[in-house]
Image (cartoon, grey):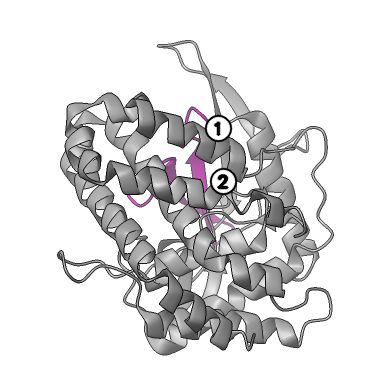
Amino acid sequence: IEGLADGCCNLSFLIRIRQNGKLHSYVVRRYHPDRTVEQIQFEHSFIHHLKHNTFTLVPGAVKCRDGGTWIQEIDPENRLPYYWAIFEFLPGEDKYTWIENNLSEPELTSAAEVLAHLHDASTGFQPTSDNAANPPLIKGFFEKLYREVDQKTGPLRIPGIQELVNPHRSLFLSVIEHILTVEGSLVAIPEIAIHSDYHPGNLKFRQERVVGVFDFDWSQMGHRAFDLSLALIYFAGRWGKKGHEGLNPDKVELFLGTYDGTLVSKTQMSPLSEIEVDLLTRLLSAVNLFILKWELDEYSANPLKHQEFTNYINHNVRLMNWINQNSRQMQKLISATCNL
């Protein structure tokens, strides 16, 4: 048994079992206390659908004796329920994290291709009454975030966070107002099951190819353009000192062009529509704030990690400014890359 240090939300262990002379490896996960049964059911159902739909790069959830794929226990200290699951172990190399994204060109190309194949394989997945995880609703999420920034409630009431965010508060509110204008357009885009956390740290590599995708615990029904925008933030974001922030245009062009080009030859899912292409720049702003809100919440909940999350918050605040200042150039690049 070996503890796995990667990941910010769940507690995971690598377990190796020797049986009849053969070595078998599994990952045992204890879910974060805020995970619900519905979210776990959604994740496991989605993984099963992907594997059934020939997307084989995901780890299957191992069944219990009763046929289920998770168990519940009660924490003896606070008497609250928590959940465990066992997954197949994916071979390959853990080369990156969510903030270490210096992929080679072949690796970046492969990551974009795999995301396109994942979205294509999600076709036909339908949530049921017992796994209907909530989608990342633009209106509900960002209206709440707007109130928190405007009224300095939630994490924004903490002095450390106020020092990081207050100098950018007016822009913060303006960006949210602009994001809220996409709500009507999103209605015209079909929802699919999406990963919602597709970054370099959730991929396994071998010989500059992606050979595994894991950590589907944030998966939910949403828009593929949301998932794609999130990936662009993670894979093309520049992590460095002030003055070196923003997105790398070459990486945006390569990832986006590969993703869209991969779908040209697919039979189930078409390339990005004109509406999706027109929305991508605003969705880049949206998913950046989606990540930033998570960082603010984690800062608030983990006093021992204030310095770590200060670095993350500063990065995404600078990225918010960069996207706002370069929105026209980014939209031109996106439209040209998708031939629109």
The answer to which of 321 and 319 lies nearer the viewer is: 321
- Nearer to us in this view, 75 or 249: 249
Q: Is residue 304 above or below residue 223?
A: above
Q: Tell whether position 247 is magenta.
A: no
State which region is magenta.
5-34
**Is residue 149 toward the left or the right of residue 176 in the image?**
left
As drawn, the label of residue 35 is: 1
Place of residue 164 in the rendered image (x, y in percent of width and height, measured from the top left): 20, 42
* Residue 22 drawn in magenta: yes
Is the residue marked by circle 2 packed among few (<14), some (14-19), or many (20+) residues within 10 Å?
Answer: many
Task: Say which residue appears at 49% left-offset and 46% top-offset.
Answer: 177
Query: Mark 1 belongs to which amino acid?
Result: Arg
* Residue occupying image coordinates x 43% and y 44%: 12
Report how far apart the C-alphas of labels 2 and 1 lie in the structure: 8 Å
Percent coordinates x, y for residue 62 in the rendering: 66, 47
Query: Can residue 56 be seen here?
Result: no
Badge 2 amino acid: Asp
User: Does dot 2 land on a helix, a strand or a loop?
Assistant: loop
The answer to whether one can see residue 274 in this image is yes
- Which quadrant is the C terminus positioned in? bottom right
Marks 1 and 2: in contact by CB < 8 Å? yes
Q: Helix or strand or loop: what does disc 1 sit on?
A: loop
> Left or right: 168 with respect to 227?
left
Residue indicated by mark 2:
217
